[in-house]
Amino acid sequence: MIVGIAGRLASRLTLIACAVTLACLGIEAGLRLRPLPPSDLRGLHEVRPDRPWLYGLKPGAHQRIADGTAEYRINADGFRDRMVARPKPPATFRIAILGDSLTFGYAVAEEDTLPRKLESRLAATSAGPRIEVLNLGVAGYNAYTEAALFADVGVRYQPDLVLVQFCVNDLNDPTLHFDFSTRTRLPEIPPEAFPDPSQRWNESSPSLAGRICEKLRSCTLVRERLFPPRDRLARQLLAIAPHADPTPREIAWLEARYGEIATAAAGIGARFAIVVFPFVTQLEPSASTRLQEALGALGARRGWPVIDLLPALRRAGASGSEPLFLDIWHTTPTGYRVAAAALAAELACRRLVPVAPGADCAAP
């Protein structure tokens, strides 16, 4: 009789466990189907410890944005772009843009991203060849991961021109941005990925349970609501702190990483240039431009064209009524349109792209 009672109890416990498991799976599935806010990029990235670029966008990933303004669709190559032919077709001038969430197109539709807007502008002034602009942006990247990605993957697209998009947060501790984008902690990050290794954020590795929790939206939601990390505010402040006056060590790091991109580009016969995005407070006429001046001096020293978008965005901010920025550094569709027009004009003026005879250097 005791054996029979124990058996029935075990059966009921098993049924309860199965019911709880199914309920948890249902909650997890529901959370995964629910649109996420633009800032939540989980599910778009995958950790790649086998590649020098550490992590990237997951081929075939798709995510809807909660406010309905856009969708993030990742192609089979792992980029937010359409698929393009390889090898490059004849009579095609191909531009590859490396960058972070600014190039990727944070919170905007794909047609409003910088690469798409630039492609449209250049198509109107091309001297003949078809112009393609490839979006190789990955949220959270800095100059180290951009250089590693281009040398490993980007060169296969055979670009004629390589643009690297600079954002002020490229000079921050990359751990904060890498972890935020992947929603997990990357295992080994090389010292070369840090603009200033002495400023590296020290944090203990998560336990096995913590790593499992990071994979589940239900678990992370509960943890973030009930047990917010005490250091979250400090981490966020470090992640967004703008380096308006970069140190010589940071500029030297940037020069080394950009040198790697320029060398890889030259190896396939491509030219290289730097595109500098301002942050929102720099739109004020009295704001410091020491950051842009430092990058301009770097380009002059190395022979790299440096295209500063601050003047165009300042003019647009002073004369227009539509907002140009979503936050401290991410731009709105209007901001991308202004940036693309200014960039297209500069590329044509500097003869970095094929242009129609008589094209001038007038500001857009």
Image (cartoon, helix red, strand yellow):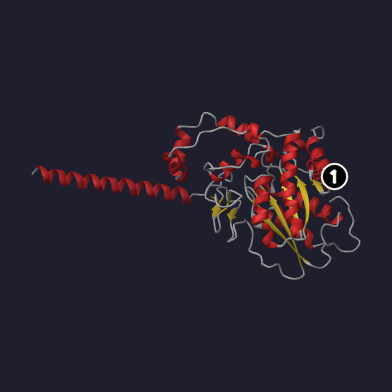
Please say if 186 is above or below 344: above
* Residue on which disc 1 sits: 300
Please say if 58 is above or below 171: below
Residue at 10 percent of width and 42 percent of height: 2
Q: Position of residue 32 (x, y in %)?
A: 47, 50
Name, please, the residue furthest toward the left: 1
* Quadrant into which the N terminus falls: top left
- Please tell me which residue lies in front, 177 or 264: 264
Q: What secondary structure is marked by label 1?
A: helix
Please say if 107 is above or below 74: above
Residue at 46 percent of width and 40 percent of height: 220
Answer with the quarter of the image where residue 16 lies: top left
**Is 149 left or right of 26, judged from the image as shown?**
right
Q: Position of residue 193 (x, y in %)?
A: 64, 42
Q: Amino acid at mark 1?
A: Ala
- The reply to whether residue 265 is in sight is yes
Name, please, the residue furthest toward the bottom: 90
- The reply to whether residue 322 is in sight is no
Residue at 67 percent of width and 57 percent of height: 154
Name, please, the residue furthest toward the right: 358
- Pointer 1 local density, CA inside 10 Å: few below 14, some 14–19, many at least 20: few
Please say if 64 is above or below 200: below
**Is 238 left or right of 309, judged from the image as shown?**
left
Answer with the quarter of the image where residue 251 lies: top right
Q: Position of residue 120 (x, y in %)?
A: 75, 60
- Please tell me which residue lies in front, 330 or 235: 235
- Please tell me which residue lies in front, 174 or 15: 174
Q: Position of residue 252 (x, y in %)?
A: 75, 39
Total labels: the figure holds 1
